[in-house]
Image (cartoon, grey):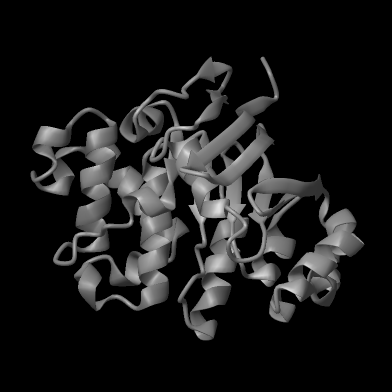
Amino acid sequence: MSDVVLAAEGLVKRFGGITATGNVTLRLERGARHALIGPNGAGKTTLVNLLTGVLDPTEGRILLEGQDVTTLAPHQRVRRGMVRTFQINQLFASMSPLQTLALVVSQQRGQGGRWWQPLGRDAAVAARCEQLLAQFHLDEVMDVPTEHLAYGKRRLLEIAIALACEPRVLLLDEPVAGVPAGERDEILRTVAALPADVSVLLIEHDMDLVFSFARRMTVLVNGTVLTEGDPDTIANDPRVKEVYLGHGETHGDPDAHEEAAHG
């Protein structure tokens, strides 16, 4: 069995005369903790939209566990084990975390039509929901309507929903975006504790999270891969520093977070 669970090969995406993604090749290994970084406008979102099927590539192909999924719709890719948090973050405002997870877990187990039954009717669904609520620090708010949750808790619920889909590849799309500083640590700890058998691609601007999480990093600039390597290599790469400083994103200067790469 190949160690590569997700591969993008020579991906190109053109919008008219603009090349948004230029010949990108990316390989996500089994159990990966891989970060995709780059300044604003680097093409990260376009690349993720290509990987997840929101956009069709102009050229190139995408392989999921060795199978070509280039032409599959997003929901078909989810069924095959590739889940993106952004795809399923349209939370039901009036439903609680427990109800939401019960719905997702029931659907995942082929019981979508019976999700509304009392949870106690299916011990396996109840047990899985209980496990997810504890893992994502949602047990204390499990009966609170989602619309009343703190923003950080909503982000945790989004990741819990993604994990309830039993992904083999999880694309975490800026999990701490918009989250107040006081609620970030909980998300960082939770992301760090994700199951080892789930291969994770993290798309993120927050360098503290990137350097504490990633074992491998790909830097995207102007739609192309500038470089790839471990956190130490990336933190000390003069081209990476130049790109970030050149875009006025000094807060994202990897040099400022080099210590984080060591622990």
237 on left or right of 173? right
Q: Looking at the image, which residue sits at the far front?
A: 17
Q: Can you give x and y, in whole percent of width and height, for residue 3 in the image?
A: 70, 24
Residue 220 seen in render: yes
Q: Is 189 in front, or is 216?
A: 216
- Whether 146 is drawn above or below 76: the answer is below
- Quadrant where the image shows the N terminus: top right
Q: Is 19 in front, or is 178?
A: 19
Image quarter of residue 112: top left
Q: Can you give x and y, in whole percent of width and height, for residue 176 in the image?
A: 51, 69
- Quadrant where the image shows the C terminus: bottom right
9 on left or right of 92? right
Residue at left 58%, top 55%?
A: 203
Q: Is 65 in front, or is 26?
A: 26
Residue at left 79%, top 46%?
A: 228
Residue at left 10%, top 34%?
A: 113
- Whether 246 is drawn above or below 3: the answer is below
